[in-house]
Image (spheres, rainbow, N blue to C red):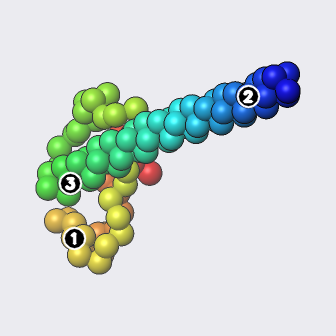
Amino acid sequence: MIHEKFKLLKGTYKEMQSQHNFIKMAKEDVNHQNLELKRLLEAVEGQVVMVDLFEKHPSKDFSCMKDSLPRGADFVALSDDDNEVSDDDPGDAHKLTSDQEDMGLI
């Protein structure tokens, strides 16, 4: 009888230990996902800042700031919105300047 109770307790302990290990691994997975989402958010925020700078100051060269962007962030080309207007020729509003091409915006 004591031997049967010991087997039952031993089985319950192993089951609880298995559940504990599963929960521990699930927590680690969630932590890794949270870190990846944080990195992606930082990358998107960096891209938004760069696009905002390019829109406000299209003739400036911001390539020196590329190294300060979070890992995974990159320069992005301006969108092809209808409200983008070039000072040179209204018909060329959607073309990239040679400076933007040199910065890798294509």
What residue type is disc 2 on? Answer: Leu
**Which residue appears at 47% of the width and 36% of the height?**
31
Q: Are marks 2 and 3 in contact (CB under 8 Å)?
A: no
CA distance separating discs 2 and 3? 64 Å
> What is the crowding at mark 2: few (fewer than 14 residues within 10 Å), some, or many (at least 20)?
few
Q: Position of residue 57 (x, y in %)?
A: 14, 51
- Taking 50 as reference, is 79 left or right? right
What residue type is disc 3 on? Answer: Asp
- Which residue in the structure is indicated by mark 1? 85
> What is the crowding at mark 3: few (fewer than 14 residues within 10 Å), some, or many (at least 20)?
few
State the residue in front, 32 or 23: 23
- Which residue in the structure is indicated by mark 2? 9
In the picture, the disc for residue 52 is 3
**Which residue appears at 34% of the width and 34% of the height?**
70
State the residue in front, 100 or 31: 31
Q: Are marks 1 and 2 in contact (CB under 8 Å)?
A: no
Q: Position of residue 101 (x, y in %)?
A: 38, 47
**Residue 18 visible, this angle:** no
